Amino acid sequence: MLELGTAGSHGAPKGEAPILRDGTVVAVLRASNWKEAATAVIGDQVWVFDKRKGRLLGRQATDAEHVARLTARQASFWKGTWAVELDGTQVEVASVSTWKGTHRFSSGGRKIAESGSTGGWAPRLTLDADDSLPLHHRVFLLWMELVLNRRNTAAVTAATSAAVFGGSS
């Protein structure tokens, strides 16, 4: 299982979050606070994740900017489903729990991963994935979960603010 650690912990530089497997750092993620973009260092490879034209994309830093090895697009807003392509492999993403914001990742009708969180006062995102899934695919899916988690938090905050401001007149 992968876990997105707290930025600056486990020897990661300030502003960078370690990605842990069984307490060991396997990658480092530097996610932007202001836009849906990140850089991931996985071993000796650097991956660039960003959003273009409504799609989440992933490529190696050495690839041309128009190359997308990993993609995710929302298939249905109402159902909360996503269509992901990982180096040519099609993956369907469905919501497991709207309340918890967790997702199931399936390919060919077989579950390959499921997201979750550590729980507690400061929950951290987790991804429990099949061992056959390459690490860069897992890191991309974990970053996708971070993006979706931030979107959900922003939506809840906006709705709460509107309710508070609307009811205070």
Image (cartoon, helix red, strand yellow):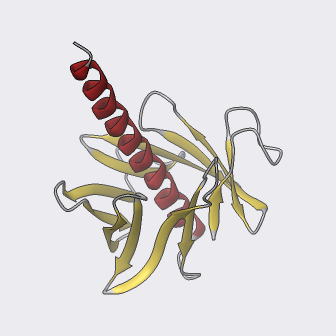
In what quadrant of the picture does the N terminus appear?
bottom right
Q: Is residue 115 above or below residue 35?
A: below
Q: Tell me: residue 90, above or below residue 51.
A: below
- Residue 72 in percent (x, y) is at 32, 57
Q: In this rendering, is residue 90 above or below 31? A: below
Asked whether 55 or 79 is in front, the reply is 79
Q: Is residue 64 visible?
A: no
Which residue occupies 67% across, 33% down?
15
Where residue 126 sits: x, y (%)? 57, 62
Q: Residue at x 38, y 50 (%)?
A: 57
Residue sticking out furthest to the right: 11
Query: x, y (%) of residue 92?
Result: 30, 72
Quadrant location, the C terminus? top left
**Which is more toward the observer, 104 or 30?**
104
| Residue under the point 37% across and 53% down | 68
Relative to the observer, which residue lies in front, 100 or 54?
A: 100
Q: Does the rendering let one see residue 159?
A: yes
Side of 167 where 110 appears, left or right: right
Q: Residue 81: which quarter of the image? A: bottom left
Image coordinates for residue 146, horizontal then vertical, percent: 48, 49
Tell me the quarter of the picture where residue 158 sits: top left
